Each structure stands twice: as C-alpha cells, then as structure tokens.
Image (cartoon, grey):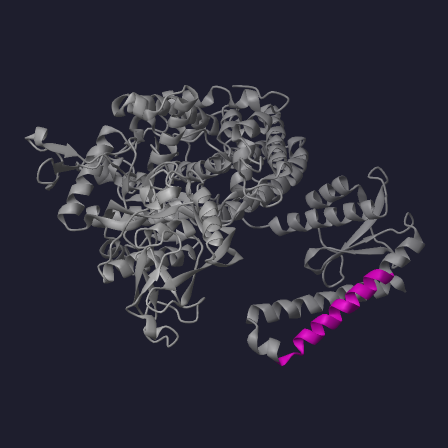
Amino acid sequence: MKELDKKYEHENVEKDKYNEWIEKGYFTAGDTSKKPYSLVIPPPNVTGKLHLGHAWDNTLQDIALRYERLKGKDVLYLPGMDHAGIATQAKVEERLRKDGVSRYDLGREAFLQKSWDWKEEYASHIREQWSKLGISVDYSRERFTLDEGLNQAVNKVFVDLYNDGLIFQGYRIINWDVEAQTALSNIEVIHKEVEGNFYTFTYKVVETGELLEVATTRPETMFGDVCIVVHPDDTRYSHVIGKHAINPANGETLPIIADDYIDIEFGTGVMKCTPAHDPNDFMIGEKYNLEMPICMNPDGTMNELAGQFAGLERFECRRQLVEYIKENGNLVSIEKHVHQVGHSERTDVIVEPYLSKQWFVKMKPLADEVLKFQNTDEKINFYPERFENTFTRWLEGIEDWCISRQLWWGHRIPAWFHKETEEIYVGLEAPKDIENWRQDEDVLDTWFSSALWPFSTLGWPDETVDVQRYFPTDLLVTGYDIIFFWVARMAFQARYFKNDRPFKDVLLHGLIRDEKGQKMSKSLGNGVDPMDVIEEYGVDALRYFLTTNSTPGQDMRYVPEKVEASWNFINKIWNASRFVQMHIGDTFYDIEKANLSQVDRFIIAKFNSTLEEVNRNMEKYEYALVGNALTRFVWDDFCSWYIELSKSGLQSDDEEVVYATKATLYTMLKNILIMLTPFMPFVTEEIYQSMPETKESINLEVWPNTIAIEEKGIEEVSFMIDAITSIRETRAQYDVKPSKPLTAMVLDSNDKPYELSSLIKSMLENMAKVTLSNIDENALIQPIKGGAVVLIETELVDKEALLEKLTKEKARLENEILRGEKMLSNEKFISKAPESKVNEEKEKLEEYRRQLQLVLNQLK
C-alpha cells in the first residue's frame, strides 16, 4: 500500500500518471460487451498552442466521458486536429517572410511540405498539452482534417453534391481578404463598429446640366460605377431617367436608370451602382444585364481602371481621390459616419466585397432537411435549450456557402478544366487524358472538411466497424460562438450523407474572460496560458475551477483566487484521506458486515442524497451544480462533521463500533474519490492507490450506487450538528473561548426538553464544550433549524451588548413580519403566485413571529 505524503504537492501527484494510463490502454475503445458512447474532439487548429478556452472545452468533454466510462460504457473519445487553411498558411508564410522567402519562390509542393512540417511541430505541442490536461482520448484513432482518409471523404462529398446539383461554380460578390488573397464565407467575417466618412459628390447630368448629389462610403469603387439609379416613383428625378451623368472620379458618362430597390427616403434618393464591388449593386447588375468591371487588384491595390490612381493601396486611393474630386468642385460634404464594417476573422483586415468566380453550396435544401428533423425524436438536443432557437433561426435564413479558397494548404478541389474547351470534369479520380486538363488551383474551405468530422473520423465513406458502432456520436461539447461555423454544417452533412444527426446532444459553453469581464486577447495582453496555471496550482485544481464555476451557455471569468479555492478543496480531501489512511491502515473494512451507528447512517444518508443529486445533474451536464453538491458533502458533511464525530467511534471500547466506523470512513472516501475522479483524475488516482482492496486504477472503477440503510436516528444526528453549530456561533458572537465550559439546555419546537440518546448527548457536550442541564429563564436563547432552540447560560455575556443585539433583532423581525403580512394580504400575490411560494411565505411569517416571541421573552 502506498502511503500518502504528509503534504499535498500537485507536481508529485500528477507526475507520470497519464503516460501509464495511456500505456495500459485504459482509454482505448472497442469493448463490444459494453454499450457504446462516443465523442469526437472539436479539433484544435494546428496554428498554435491550446489556450484556456481549449482547456475548458476539453475538460467538460473529459468529465462527461469519464463518467460514462465509470458507468460501464465502451467510451470512444476520438482526438484529432484541424489543418485550419487560412490561419495555418498565414503562419507558415509569416515564418517564410522572416527568411526572405515567399510561397511563390518555393512553389506549391515545397510550400506544402513546409506546412506539413509546421503541422507536425504544433501537433506535438497540442498532444503534450492534452497529456497535461489529463484528457482520456484514444490516441490509436487520432485523425487530422487533411489526412488521406479525410481527403477521400471530402472528395466524395464534393463530387456527390456536385452531381446532385448542390454545388455549382459561378460569379458572385464574395468577401475578399486582401491580405490572404482569398475568398471568405459570410461567417468568417467579423463586423466591427468603425468610424468612417459619408462622402457626397455631384454627378452632372449631360443633357440638362443639373447636378445630382450621390453619397458613398467607398469612393475608391467609383472607377467600377456603371450607372446611376433612382426610384421610378421619385418625382424629383423622373425627368432624368434615361439620361446620363458624368462620373466625377474619371469623367465617364453613366446612364441613369430607375429601380424600386432605391429607398426614396434615404440620403438624396440617388445611388451609384458598382456591381463588381457591392452585393446589392450586383443584383441590380444581374437584373439589367449590366457590365461588371472590377477596379481593384486581389491585393487591395487599384488596377488600370483607376487611371492616375492605379497601383495605390485602396484606402490611399480613397484619400487622394476625394482630394481630386474636391479640387474639381464636385465635393458636397464629408460627414462622420459610424457603421459596421466586415473584417477578416483570420487576418483582421477590412474585407472587400469583390466579384469573383467561386464554388458554392446551395444551402437551402440541406438546411430544410435538418429543420424538418428538429421536430422529431431524431433532433439534436441543445444544452442549454435556448440555443436551439439560434441554430434554427440561422438555418431558416441561410445563404449559399462560398467553399473555394485561393490557398495552397487545404483539400484541393476535385475539379478539372479542359485546356481547350474549358469543359468541367468533377470526379474522385483525375481525367484519364490528364495532359489535356488542368486541375482547379483552389482548395476547399476548412469548414468543408470539419463538417464531416463526426463520421469521416470513424472511417467513412467506408462502412467501418467504428462507423456502425459509434455513429451518431452521443455528445458534442463546443463554444456557443461556433454554432453557425461548425454545428450547423455537421448537422446538414450528416443528414445528407448518413441520414442521421451527427450527435444526440450538444453542450454549449461560453467564452473565458478576464477578471474584469473582458474577452481575452493578445492585443489586450490579458490571456492566460493554462500550462502556467497548471504549474502553479496543478491540473486538478484548474479542471475543477473550469467546470464548476459556470453554468452551460454562460461566459466565465478567470479568477485566480477561485483556482486557489479549488486547490484548497483538494488539499482538504488530501488531509481527510490521510486521516482515514492513518486509522484503517492496509486493512479492508466491509460496510456490509458492519453494525452501523446512527452517526454512520447519518453520513451514508447524506452520501445517498448527494449521489442522487450528482447523478441528476451529471445527466444534464450541470457540472457547477454537481460541484456544489460534492463540495458541500465532502467539505461540510464528511470532513467537518463525520471525521470529527468518527473520533468517538474510533476510540470506542466496542470492537463492533470501531469496525463500523472504519468501514464507513473507507466506503465514504472511496465513493468520494470515484465521484470526483471525472473532475480531478490525478489526485483521486493517487489517494485511491493508497487504499486497500482496490483495483489497479481508479479508471477501472464502477460508478457508486446508493447504500441501503435504516433511517432511524439520523434526524437526531442532524439536530445535534445544528445545536453544536448554534452554540459555536454564540461563542464566536460573544467572544467566549472554546476552552470555557458552558451550561446549555436544548428545547424542541414545543419548548420542551429535547430527548437525546446517550451517544448524541455525549457527542454534543464533547464537541460544543457544554454541559447539558436545566437552565433558568434568564438564559440566552439561540434558534436552531426546525424551530428548536438552545438555551445558554448568560453569566459570561455582556448584558449591555446583549440588550443592544436583542433590540436590533426585535426591529428586524418586526420589519420582516410587516413585510410578510403585507404580502399575504395582497390579493394579486395570492392569486398569481405559485401555491408553493404562498405556502413558503406563510411558513416564513410564522417562523418570524415565533422568533420575535423568543426575543421578547429574553428582553423581559
């Protein structure tokens, strides 16, 4: 038997355990004698190391899976990582730039090799962090979104969707990242409030000479203007429809057309139309078959259409162009204008609406299918439930998804163009006469492969044993901020290709913020490295903090003092375990053979009710409530009370009493460790292995059941604890030292002496340092829960201080009684409030009246 160190030191406790667990295969799935339970890890990007949000995400997953494993399930926790197209390519290119090299210098193949080198480097960092966090993944099944098997799945999905008419190529206005020089989908754009300008210019009507005032926030796009648009019912401008106006940016003549898209009330009611640089203008361009000239290069500089401004960066062009228009007398005004401007999620540059030929997925048919099944038993269950509304609303308003990216790092699109005819061939294999074809240079959006993650990782498109056994997965744990990015995409791909949901439950958590509630970011310098926290407090303390300080769907603040509080809780468990070890040694005490005392039965009853509460909340993923229940039971009931009360049983001359006490200590500690091990696996393993008659590892244990006991006498123990607490509070209140003996008397709710058994009377006197005896009516009266009171001698109490206290208490109780009477005389309250609430208020009122009478008696 291993003896516990005198002091809890997390460094020693957590050392080497994880590698041993992995080597012994405790987390390897595949036991077909058990019911399966599966979860695929939300794959972290290979762009860097894990942050605190990852630690929270992974710990929540691990708790759920360790719990299911203890309940006898064959658990698959599948690890993997995401190639993160744009983000990883940007990191690799940044590294190359430091060496004075570009990806074009290297060429595609050499650049991809550099990217794979990066992946291997950062994948090893991530695995190291997973081991530090102690997550129980099955490494034998680890996947990567760009591995060969995933590539086969991605190609099949692309080809099938294309053949089914759900993928198409076409010109659309897309979000263009001028730094990464790639298209972005709508959800890869973050809108930020930016203070810009509203520029109003004059466009001269050729035929009449009059001036039309036109406003824009993006003057640099004026080189792509193809017409001026007014509303057909706007009487101010009906006479100029069909005429022409001069573009003040380049002197070109633009036709004036009419369309009811124009809002007569907005601005001047006159709009310039730039179809290649604005999504709304694009629709007008399509409607009237207008030209769609692009005036900007992919890198955000102006092209030859900008004339003298060609080659300028877009915002520098804006500055110089406005000055040019002003010099020519065509500037009317510049007004400050605060508006939402799209920024690239990855590079943070302002996104440019840009006409481009891209690949798209028709989303509506796919989304409709998911929505249909959200009204059946095959729905995805959201925790918290309110996020289902977020999910369905987005699907209902869904737009086509731009899936092509102008990158090299990613799944290359399985489409080829004939070199002479430009015929398109889409297939799993390249065309046979490959020399006549060129493959599309673009790759697919990262989320295209991530959307297949719940089944592609299991070996699909082959119908593998793992696909048949573990799909659909049971649970997804992820942040609420990627419902659109990932959850919805997995839902429609699983429905289309597997005719099923990807997972049964989704547990959504929020963001981790700093102590002030600010989002953690590099720019603010308020990020926290989980590895630093682990070094200072240990991973068990971090895990317990992360999972018991926030309810599902809510953000959490990182507060070091709360991590320290978790460490203190673990230290409390450690010291309690050493007490148990000291008394039971290496002997196993069987609780089924014990003749339990009422004190033993009391702690077992507390354990039973705690276990029921824990089970109920574990099933709902309410880990904060589980933490509350466990902390209350372990700290208060077991450590603070039962261990103290057990000293009497341990010192008894009766061997049966000693055996029962030791059996209870052993059983309670073992069950505490099993209930806590999903949250804090390292320290529970260390303590567990120090106990006699246990398995090789706590990972092989079984989740506990309630213990059948006789209820007789349990209530008396609870009463004794309340009485001891009341007496101790009185000592503290009146500064009476514990060493000073007191005389006390306990009365029940009918003001009659409380009949205590000899054991309980002895324990109460010993622990409260009192002698129970009759006391005269001048005693200090202290309430106990349930309406009972304890009378304590007043000789040691400062009478003036007591009088002042009682007077204040009298005023407080009178106010409470007044409030209660007023509430219960209010007909609206009585008629509208739940019956339970009304009864609760009535009970409180009666208790206040009883307490007031006690105070009045004391004041006499």
Residue lying at 57% horizontally and 40% vertically, measured from the top left: 596
Nearer to the camera, 298 or 846: 298
- Position of the C terminus by quadrant: bottom right
How far from the left and from the top, in percent, is residue 219?
42, 52
Q: Quadrant of residue 578?
A: top right
**Residue depicted at 79% across the width and 66% down the height:** 852
Q: Is residue 382 above or below residue 823?
A: above
Which residue is drawn at the image coordinates 37% and 50% (left, top)? 221
> Where on the picture, by quarter, is residue 237?
bottom left
**What is the number of callouts on the image?**
0
Relative image position of residue 126 (x, y in whole percent): 42, 27
Q: Main secondary structure of the magenta part?
A: helix
Q: Which residues are magenta?
A: 807-827
* Left or right: where 727 falls relative to 620: right
Considering every residue shown, the one lying at the far bottom of the view is 827
Q: Is residue 129 magenta?
A: no
455, 36: nearer the viewer? 455
